[in-house]
Image: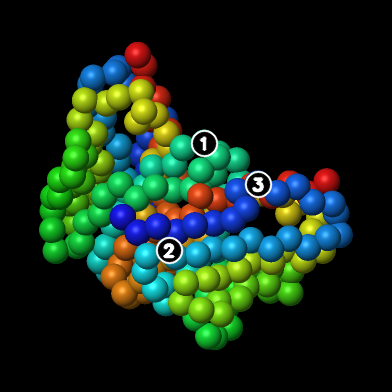
Amino acid sequence: GAVVSQHPSRVICKSGTSVKIECRSLDFQATTMFWYRQFPKKSLMLMATSNEGSKATYEQGVEKDKFLINHASLTLSTLTVTSAHPEDSSFYICSARGSAFEAFFGQGTRLTVV
Amino acid sequence: GESVGLHLPTLSVQEGDNSIINCAYSNSASDYFIWYKQESGKGPQFIIDIRSNMDKRQGQRVTVLLNKTVKHLSLQIAATQPGDSAVYFCAENRAGNTPLVFGKGTRLSVIA
């Protein structure tokens, strides 16, 4: 299947700092990418949808100024958690879809804010 | 509201037995369904998918069945192995290139 690479897999940052997470589609062009957040023993919660070259669409309750999403190319989307706080600690997962229906996921990023 | 859900939150099976994981969906307009496997600390891994114009699709040791009449989806794993232990999610595509809607997940534990 298609490969979606997410980096870093784990990051620990201090409260108040910003963290950038990258999501790359390695062997296909992703017109749309999705960012999810997952709490322990819970399902994936959609945060936002990003389309290449346009502004991201955020789900209700997700602060767009806190979770900055950039989809500058057909193979790269980034999620920046700004002014991180301990409650932002979570597992963040990106997903990419190409021209077909299939959606492939990155390996996830475990963010810990101390 | 409409949702994708799972009948069983946990499932324990003996190694070598067959596993069946079920999923109910309520949006009759959904046209595409995917099963994902998620191991601890990792992102969801695509297992198998099925379009709404089909009722069965087989992969390697896995089979997905779709019953549109009762809006039910199932994942069958043949000869379950310890490596199959994970959380399994069903997901539905409701329209075009929209985000997938995920079910709650079922944890499969394989007993050696």
Residue at image location 42% in from the left, 77% down from the top: A31
Whole-number angstrom distance, CA of label 1 to CA of label 3: 14 Å
* Residue A27 falls left or right of residue A108: left
Q: Are the residues under badges 2 and 3 in a single subunit?
A: yes
Q: Tell me where residue B50 appears, x and y as whole percent.
A: 21, 56
Which element carries disc 2, helix, strand or loop?
A: loop
Q: Which residue is mark 1?
A: B40
Query: Tag 1: residue type?
Result: Ser
Residue situated in front as seen by the camera: B34 or A52:
A52
Q: Chain of mark 3?
A: A
Q: Tell me where residue B56 appears, x and y as whole percent.
A: 13, 50
Q: Are the residues under badges 2 and 1 in a single subunit?
A: no
In which quadrant is the N terminus of chain B drawn?
Answer: bottom left
Which element carries disc 1, helix, strand or loop?
A: loop
Query: Tag 2: residue type?
Result: Leu
Instruction: Kindly identify which numbered label has been placed on residue A10.
Output: 3
Q: Earlier in the sequence, mark 2 or mark 3?
A: 3
Q: Is residue B71 above or below residue A74?
A: above
Residue at image location 21% in from the left, 25% down from the top: B79
Q: Chain of mark 2?
A: A
Question: Would you say residue A71 is visible in this rendering?
Answer: yes
Whole-number angstrom distance, CA of label 2 to CA of label 1: 23 Å
Which numbered disc, 1 or 3, marks the residue closer to the eye? 3
Which element carries disc 3, helix, strand or loop?
A: strand
Q: Which residue is mark 2?
A: A26
Which numbered disc, 2 or 1, marks the residue closer to the eye? 2
